Amino acid sequence: QQKVQQSPESLSVPEGGMASLNCTSSDRNFQYFWWYRQHSGEGPKALMSIFSDGDKKEGRFTAHLNKASLHVSLHIRDSQPSDSALYFCAASEQQGGRALIFGTGTTVSVSP
Amino acid sequence: EAAVTQSPRSKVAVTGGKVTLSCHQTNNHDYMYWYRQDTGHGLRLIHYSYVADSTEKGDIPDGYKASRPSQENFSLILELASLSQTAVYFCASSDRGNERLFFGHGTKLSVL
C-alpha cells in the first residue's frame, strides 16, 4: 500500500476558482509534508512545506495539516491556467535529512 | 536556481542490455536521489545517497544499482534491462537537512 495517498486523481477548475487537493499518510512515522508541482515535460518543483498543525499560506497557496489524522490539504485560490499541472504530496519521517516519499499525484486542469 | 542535469534525455534499450543513466549537479548539495515516475504510481524512490562513495536503497531498488563517485555525480545502472523498467527517471539533489529537492528534467527510458 502507498504510504502517501492523494485524492482526487484529477480535478477541473474554472479560471479564478478554488482548487482543493487532499493527501493522507498511512504511516504514522511520516509526519512532515511537502507539496510539489510538475508541469508537463519538466521535473517536479517544490511549492511549500508544512510541518506543524494548522494553516500555512504562501501567496495563492494555502496548506493545512492535521497531524492527528495525518491529513494535509492544499488549496489554490484564484486558480490560473498556469496552475494546470500534476501536484504531488510528499512526506518524510523527520524534519531534515531523510528521503521524501511521494504520493501518486493529482492532475489539476484550469480552464479559461 | 540550482541545477541538476540528466543525460541522456531519452534512451531506447534492448531487453537484457545494460543501461546507465547519469546525473550531475552544480548545487554543492550533499544529498542526491533517483526516482522513477509511472502513471498511477507517482514518484517512487529507487536509490539515494547522502555522501560520495555511499548509497542507500529506496523503496524499489530491485534491478537497479547506484553509484556516487563524487559529490556532483550520481548514476543509476540497470545491469539487465527489462520491459518493466520502461519509465521516466528523475534525479534530484537537496541540501543537508532540507527536503526541498531540486529535480532534473528527467530521462525517458524505453526498454524494447
Image (cartoon, coloured by chain):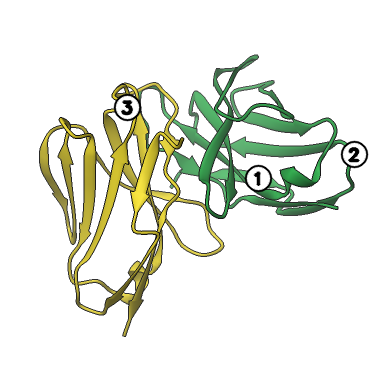
Chain colours: A yellow, B green
Q: Where residue A28 sits in the image (x, y, percent)?
A: 28, 24
Please identify the quarter of the rendering in which residue A18 is found: bottom left
Marking on residue A51: none
Note whether B104 is above or below B97 in the view shown.
below
The amino acid beneath tag 1 is Gln
Count the numbered circles shown: 3
* SS label for mark 1: strand
Q: Where residue A82 sits in the image (x, y, percent)?
A: 36, 71
Residue bearing mark 2: B17
Q: Residue furthest left?
A: A54
Marking on residue A30: 3
Taking the image as shown, residue A45 lies to the left or right of residue A32, namely: right
The amino acid beneath tag 2 is Gly
Q: Residues within 10 Å of mark 1 (few under 14, many from 20)?
A: many
Residue bearing mark 1: B6
On whether disc 1 and disc 3 are found on a single subunit, the reply is: no
Q: Indicate the chain on which mark 2 is placed.
A: B
Q: Estimate the spatial distance between the alpha carbons at disc 1 and disc 3, rounded to whole Å.
A: 29 Å
Sequence-first tag of 1 and 2: 1
Q: Indicate the chain on which mark 1 is placed.
A: B
Q: Residue furthest top?
A: B54
Taking the image as shown, residue A3 lies to the left or right of residue A57, namely: right
